[in-house]
Structures are given as C-alpha cells and as structure tokens.
Amino acid sequence: MSRGRILIADDEPTYLTSTAELLRHEGFTVDTVEEAESALEAITANSYDLLITDLEMPGNADLDLVQQVAHLSGGLPIIIITGFPSVRSAVASIELPVAAYLVKPVHFPELLKRVSSAVARFRSYRAMQTAETRLREYRQQLEPPPAPGTLPLASTGDARNGVDSFLALTLRNVMGSLTDLEQLGRALAGQTTPDVHACQLINCPRGAQLRAAVEETISVLEETKGAFKSKTLGDLRHKLELLLKHV
C-alpha cells in the first residue's frame, strides 16, 4: 500500500528522476512534471498528498505555481526546493501552505523526513474532514420526522418502507464512520508511533463524537426491535455493542 501520492515539479531531469526513484523506493507513489503548467494540470486531474516544486522553472515566476496550487487544492502541502534561495521568496512562502523551504543540494534523509511528516499531516487532515462530513450527514438523518398532519398519511406499507430506507441509510453512515476512524488512525500512526492502534482514537475529542453516534444508533435499534423483527439488524446491534465494549 502506498505511503502517499506525490507530485514533483522540476526542470532538472537528473534531479527529477533520481528524487522520484528514491521516494518510490520508500513506498510513495510519485508523478513528475518539468514545468508549472503541467503541474497544475496534474493537480487538477488527480488527488495528491504533497507537491515538491523547484522555484526556478518555467511558469513559476514569483511563486506563481505555489500561489495557484494554494487556491486550487484545498490545503495541499508544498515543499519548495531551490538552488537559488532568496529572502524574498522565503518570506513570500510563509504566507502559503509551504511545509518546507529547502536549498539544493538536499540530503535525502532530510527530504524524506519532511516528506513523511507533510504527507502524514495532510492525510490526517483529510481523514478527519471526511469523518466530520459523514457525521453531519448522519445527524441530519437522525433529525425528528415532521409533526403529524404536516404530510399526507402514508399507508402501512409505505411507512414501513420509509423507515427501512431510513435505517439502511443511517447504518451505512455508521459503518462508514467506523471506516473513516480506521483510516484516520492509520494516517495518525504514520506520524506518531508504530504501535498506535486506530481504535484508541475513539477516545479522542472528535472520536468521542463518532462514539456517541454509534451509541445513538444502538439505542435506535434497541427501541425499534419490536417493530422490525430482523435478525440482521439484531446481529448488527450486537456487533456495534461489542465494538464499543472493546475500545
């Protein structure tokens, strides 16, 4: 499994090829381009965890590429590597999502350290965003139904189908939230210690919100077990209860 997807933009073919190969050897997926326009096209068409870019290359005058990426990519971290450092470019990079400003020649262990840290932080950020979005959707589905009389009365069959659909959507969101939590754990483990288990995160502040959502789902399943005599839903409730008991 890839440690992250990286785009390298540099007009020095030797540096571009050698750096890409070294990072691939460390488990990263790496794409390469030689000028800013191609870099923007690649970022627009693909999902990356990091951009490594040179300053002195076609299309990147006055940090143009870095500024455009900052507006296009939703916080994609950027590592600038340049053979021509200047106070002006260093100061300008402070106001942009620049994870590191390095001067060529860069020792690979130092670059790898910066790359690993930037990718892990960005993956954690995206995983948390996904989990929060899913949690908002889940809460919307748990909003109380309209008051009696505000909508035409449905037949018993229609009402049962509506509740079945509601439960199905809710349960999918719950299971999706657990998957998000696992992915978040893996992302954070990449920047902390190897023995961090994803399930430990269920006790973190935002993980507690996901835990509350699972507990609320268990409660709904318990309350509706008389109306919906479903072995599948009963088994799912039992699994969710076991999950919370062992984390």
Image (cartoon, rainbow, N blue to C red):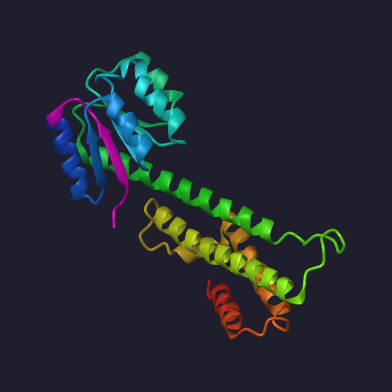
34, 108: nearer the viewer:
34
Residue at image location 57% in from the left, 75% down from the top: 240
Residue 86 falls left or right of residue 154: left
Magenta part of the protein: which range? 1-13
Whole-percent x and y of residue 177? Answer: 54, 61
Residue 150 falls left or right of residue 140: right
In the rendered image, the residue lying farthest to the left is 14
In the rendered image, the residue lying farthest to the right is 149
Is 4 included in the stretch rendered in magenta?
yes
Q: Is residue 109 visible?
A: yes
Residue 47 falls left or right of residue 159: left
Name the image quarter holding the N terminus: bottom left
Q: Is residue 215 visible?
A: no
In the depicted structure, whether residue 155 falls above or below residue 196: below
Residue at image location 29% in from the left, 25% down from the top: 36
Whole-percent x and y of residue 97? Answer: 43, 31
In the depicted structure, whether residue 206 falls above or below residue 165: above
Residue at image location 26% in from the left, 47% down from the top: 29
In the depicted structure, whether residue 66 falls above or below residue 75: above
Dividing the picture into quadrants, the one containing residue 101 is top left
Residue 36 falls left or right of residue 133: left
Whole-percent x and y of residue 245? Answer: 57, 76
Whole-percent x and y of residue 210? Answer: 59, 61
Total number of numbered discs in the rendering: 0
112, 124: nearer the viewer:
124
Is 117 included in the stretch rendered in magenta?
no
Dividing the picture into quadrants, the one containing residue 148 is bottom right
